[in-house]
Amino acid sequence: MENAPNKSLLEHNKGLLQSIDLYEYILETSVYPREPAPLKELRMATANHPWFFMSTAPDAAQLMGMLLKIVNAKKTIEIGVYTGYSLLLTALSIPDDGKVLAIDINRETYEIGLPIIRKAGVEHKIDFIESQAIPVLDKLLKNLSTKYPPYKALFPFCITILELQRVKLIFFFVFLFHQKENEGSFDFAFVDANKDDYMNYHERILKLVKVGGLIIYDNTLWGGTVARPEEAVSEDRRDSRRSIIEFNKSISTDHRLEISLAPWGDGMTICRRIC
Ligand SMILES: C[S@@+](CC[C@H](N)C(=O)[O-])C[C@H]1O[C@@H](n2cnc3c(N)ncnc32)[C@H](O)[C@@H]1O
């Protein structure tokens, strides 16, 4: 089969479906025939990378692409980029003047997908930030630019005499003028990074996404381990399993959201902010 990924990737992505055959059937009949060419190229480019299993499953991504369009997402944020499958999907699904603020601690893996993103003509929609996500989210919530040194926004009068040249001064005022409120300004967020911070991401992301906006959390069934006793789970998966269980429990009673835990891929919780 032309599209065929390796068996271990299929085994990983089939999630809670009964068999690889059934999962392959879904991919072959309804996902691959509609997968945009750049996404297919990125999926192939990722297939031989040692962490290939981290990439968002194509069937889950297909649903995400539709949701992005349903909410007319324009300003979006992604935590956890890896080689960029979900990032490219988002960039392809939003309008030409849309934006994805993409955060990952590892720029190296993002650069695997970057040539394909460029070729697809959507690089201008992406602001990639190589960083731990929490400090970036905190900066956004303080309405500080994620690109410009924060002391300049906090202490305008700290600008040194040396900087009081005309060009820099004009730039500074333009920067202040354009500084926007970030709270409630994002249409869409995709969270797919370290599981032990999901609760920390949630409180911040919820403030950044507008009422009516969507937040998707990936891997919320953690390979099905959430429903198994801890002793039956390999040790390397236990900490994240505990974090995901705690996260799932917490958002199930979070009245600021409507939620649906969809068993796509490794489980994705789709949240709509309602207040
Ligand atoms: C599951 S992968 C993301 C997969 C990606 N969404 C895709 O479709 O290919 C998780 C990513 O989260 C990143 N990550 C882990 N901890 C992080 C943190 N504290 N802040 C930001 N990114 C983090 C990792 O470097 C990794 O690239």
Image (tube, helix red, strand yellow):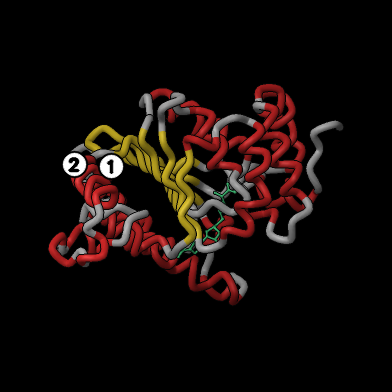
Pair 1/2: label in front: 2
Q: Residue at x 32, y 55 (%)?
A: 202
Task: Please tell me in which quadrant of the rendered image residue 44 appears.
Answer: top right
Q: Residue at x 37, y 55 (%)?
A: 248
What type is the residue that disc 1 sits on? Val
The secondary element bearing badge 1 is classed as strand
User: For this view, does 149 lie left or right of residue 60?
Assistant: left
Residues 104 and 53: in front is 104
Q: Residue at x 79, y 43 (%)?
A: 5
Q: Residue at x 56, y 75 (%)?
A: 231
Is the residue marked 2 within 8 Å of ligand 1, measured from its CB?
no
Q: Can you identify the residue that label 2 sits on?
A: 177
Q: Residue furthest right?
A: 1
Query: Where residue 192 appears, x then y in whole percent?
Result: 49, 53
Task: Please tell me in which quadrant of the rendered image residue 67 appears.
Answer: top left
User: For this view, does 38 lie left or right of residue 73?
Assistant: right
Whether residue 33 is situated above or below residue 244 in the rendered picture: above
Instruction: Mark 1 and mark 2 in contact? Answer it, CB < 8 Å.
Output: no
Query: Where residue 8 appears, x then y in whole percent?
Result: 77, 53
Residue 182 makes an appearance in the image: no
What type is the residue that disc 2 sits on? Phe
Residue 69 makes an appearance in the image: yes
Q: Report, in whole angstroms, how far the alpha carbon at label 1 lies from the one at label 2.
A: 22 Å
The quadrant of the picture occupied by the C terminus is top left
Q: Can you identify the residue that label 1 sits on?
A: 209
The secondary element bearing badge 2 is classed as helix
